[in-house]
Image (tube, rainbow, N blue to C red):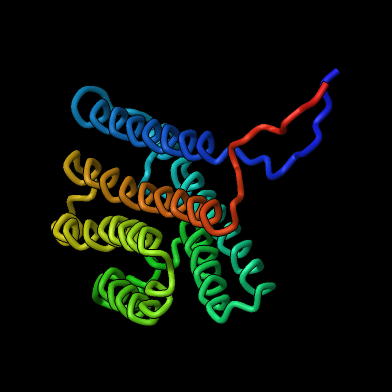
Amino acid sequence: MAKPTSLGIQFPTRRLLKGLTVTCVILLLIHIALTICHYRWIELPWMLRELFDVDEEESIPTWFSSGVLLLVAVVLFFIYRLKRLAGDSYAPYWAGLGAGFTFMSVDEIAGFHETLNSVIEMSWAVPGLVVAVVVGLLYLKFLFSLPTATAVQFMMAGAIFVGGAIGVELATEPFLYNDELDTLAYNLWTPVEEGMEMGGVIFFLSALFDYLKNSYQMEFNVAPRATK
């Protein structure tokens, strides 16, 4: 009988990323299908729509998005631990990213950013954009310390996420001002926004796995070798 002689690190990242991507696409398509069906053909029960509405806090897509954000936070704290043990001066930056993604995971469910709209007159996306720019400037030195390919991937992921979370949010503000949130047009914009957010996070997770593999020679996708 074959017995493993070396386990290494058994974590199928490619399968995980593919599963997350497929799940993301399916959830977006369900939202789109239900939305078109509701506004074009037959009025659907609110509970069914809410269950798959990407713009609702208490929905399957939102919980999925929150879970992916939390997974990214775990990976970031894992890298922080490795960097701290190695005495890397940039270790706190990884911890800062981990804390940020943890907050975003909780916010995805709690909706803190939307509550901000009840406190200030302007859209939460405006101060959100300011925060994104400030964080980006504070992390420039950190980005320059990374391998070029990793830095480019990080910036691309950030651009996709911010483009959805803030860019699309600002672009759809007229729907709110004109009391047109309960329309087909608006509800077809929300999967664009959430799709860019989830896509950006999944792409960032892929970049983190590539960084770990290249920097620490972690063979995530290999099976244990066995001898007879």
Above or below: residue 112 compared with residue 8: below
85 and 157: which is toward the camera: 85
The residue depicted at 81 percent of the width and 35 percent of the height is: 5
In percent of width and height, residue 24 lies at 41, 38
On screen, residue 155 versus residue 107, left or right, reads left
On screen, residue 87 versus residue 161, left or right, reads right
Q: Is residue 156 visible?
A: yes
Looking at the image, the residue that sits furthest to the top is 1
- Indicate the quadrant containing the C terminus: top left, top right, bottom left or bottom right: top right
The residue depicted at 41 percent of the width and 40 percent of the height is: 50
The residue depicted at 43 percent of the width and 76 percent of the height is: 142
How many dots with numbers? 0
In percent of width and height, residue 118 lies at 35, 72
227 and 176: which is toward the camera: 227
In percent of width and height, residue 57 lies at 45, 51
Q: Is residue 66 visible?
A: no
In percent of width and height, residue 184 lies at 19, 39
The residue depicted at 63 percent of the width and 41 percent of the height is: 11
Above or below: residue 199 compared with residue 28: below
- Indicate the quadrant containing the N terminus: top left, top right, bottom left or bottom right: top right
Residue 174 occupies which quadrant of the picture?
bottom left
